[in-house]
Image: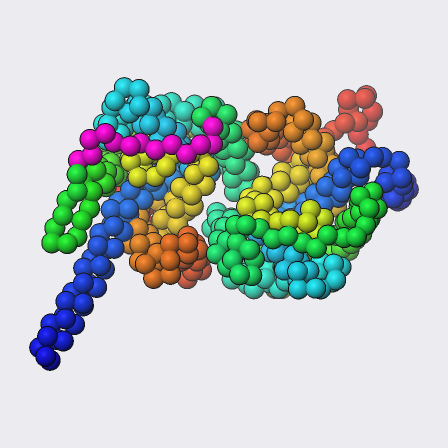
Amino acid sequence: MKRGFWILAAIIVLLLPWVGNNYFIRLATIMMLYCVLALSWNFIGGLTGYPSFATAAFFGLGAYAGAISQGQGVPMYLAWVIGAALAAIFATGLGLAILRLRGHYFAIASLVVADVLREIVNSTTNLTGGGMGLNLPVLKLGVDAQAKLFYYCMFGIALLTIFTAAYVMRRPLGFGLGCIKQNEDAANIIGINATIFKTIAFSLSAVFVGGAGAFYASWVNYIEPGDVFDILFAIKPIVMVLLGGAGTVSGPIIGAIVFLILEELVWRNFLTFHAGVLGLIVVFLIFYLPDGILDLNYRRWFGWRKN
Amino acid sequence: MLAAVLSRRRSLSEHISMLYLQVLLNGLVLGGLYACIAAGFSLVWGVLNVINILHGTFIVIGSYAAYFAYVYFDIHPLVSIPIAAVILFFIGYALQSGVINKVVAAPVLTTLTLTFGLDLFLNNLLIVAFKADYRKVTLENPLGVLSLSGITVPIDRLAAMALALLLTGLLFWVLDASRVGRAIVAVRMDREAAALMGVKVKKIYALTFAIGAVMAGAAGSLMSLIYPISPLNSGIFLGKAFIICVLGGLGSVPGVMVGGLALGVVESFGALAFGPEHAVTLSFIILILFLLFRPTGIMGKRGFQ
């Protein structure tokens, strides 16, 4: 039955571009982008229990790597792979350094990485265009065809992320990460090489985000440092995972979908105060839904017995 | 002729050393203000074990209080500190006792995300109320410039730095000598033992957070003399507070003073050596290096004494 549900969802997603208008296609593309961000953060934050705020850094790095290579004449899809690879390599190096820190110290170190990268991008004007931003080559395709193309590409990236997440959770790697989350010292003692496990989790949390960043650059055709290194790219995935339920595959997906709906409603109705309302949602979430939607005992509301 | 060349050389080297002295002095003046920026942040982190993302926004609120006091009531920003302090004391106390206290013992991710959410809300409130425009306190009667054999410094800035260090020292004295201060230190050392001795821990948490906010407000008042005022600046102040806490060592007033002065000097010389656009990058890289190789900071780990 569970499998049937997933197949049904996939069919709906595949057929949507032929039913909805461009607004819906765009929303659905953003939704899948959010799924990728949330599932990626889940590797390091949800499974391993490290409060990483580096997602924005990986996203911006992937976006700039993709944009610069496309500007040099590299084909679009290869540019996405370059963005993903560069983010993963960067995360491996960074992880080996800062994953030795714990708690608040790790949070702060990961938080400032995006700031450092943004300042570097801002000041290397020759390569990145600095604060002026970077224009990307425009595809020679109609508006509708472009919307559909990017929609299906994003769906592909999202599927890849989902399968990787599901695979990792069933393998010893996922089990080891869970052990590290519960008690890192004990995990070390029972023979889990915590350093390698954590670094792999950190790289996994970067690779798809980097690809999604490069995708984003091609999609919107123009990027600037303040946009792609926005700290909200680090906060939103955390909120989505908390909203859905951490440490699972379906939790981040549900969280991303619900978050997108909330965000869109807030954007529409509170144009000048959307960040404030977002903040209130975060506060509400922490107090009234600390374990996410998946943990809700909804069967009780309808008078069903919880099995 | 040789003598002439030699004397010219000497004057050039003298000139360079004067430049270094001037940069050092600028750095120290800035560093005194930085110490005040980070004092409240360090206190909250050390005692509550909460990273207070709201701190930057608190500083901006203090700056606005100073700005409006100056524009409407003609009160000098150095004198209007109590106004900002009172406003922020109540904001801080209300936030801690009403919201943050409920999850204060939760893991890092929860408290950090909570203060992030509160910051999004408060900062957006400021943008709606005051617009994102940059404002500036332009003094009608500046106190002038102190000039000492080629090294110059505006007296207003010097006074702001002195007051900042004085306030940070006052915080040290409060923690060291007052009843409330000893209770705060006791809670930091051992929460359970302090509770057994009759300290009301939740109330002390709220007071600590309020004192942290007061220090932020005071720092904001002082910074209004130097920095442009806008809600968009809150992230800059927060970043500086991070760096200072890690540089000086977490949770001690002397650590904050050393960290603040060190950051001020590093930023001044960094701007001289690499250009001002790289000063932020430099200080963040120093932050990461310190986190990796000396997480206890320059002073080593020590509590409030």
Toward which corner of the image does residue B172 lie, by quadrant?
top left
Relative image position of residue A62 (x, y in whole percent): 64, 56
- Is residue B190 at all visible to an observer of this figure? no
- Is B13 in front, or is A26? B13
Is B168 a magenta residue?
A: no
Task: Find the residue positioned furthest to the top.
Answer: B73
Task: Find the residue positioned furthest to the bottom.
Answer: B2
Relative image position of residue A270 (x, y in whole percent): 62, 24
Q: Quadrant of the C terminus of chain B?
A: top left
Q: In this view, does B25 lie above or below B91?
A: below
Q: In which quarter of the image is the N terminus of chain B?
A: bottom left
Q: In this view, does A299 lie above or below B45?
A: above
Relative image position of residue A48 (x, y in whole percent): 62, 51
Q: Which residue is pictured at 69% across the width and 46% down the height?
A: A220
Q: Is A294 on the left or on the right of B194, as rendered?
A: right
Q: Which residue is pictured at 61% across the width and 56% down the height?
A: A64
Q: Is the magenta stretch mostly helix, strand or loop?
A: loop
Q: Is B8 on the left or on the right of A138, as rendered?
A: left
Toward which corner of the image does residue B274 lie, by quadrant?
bottom left
- Is A38 in front, or is A189? A38
Relative image position of residue A27 (x, y in whole percent): 75, 37
Q: Which residue is pictured at 67% across the width and 54% down the height?
A: A136
Q: Give the range drawn in magenta.
A: B131-143
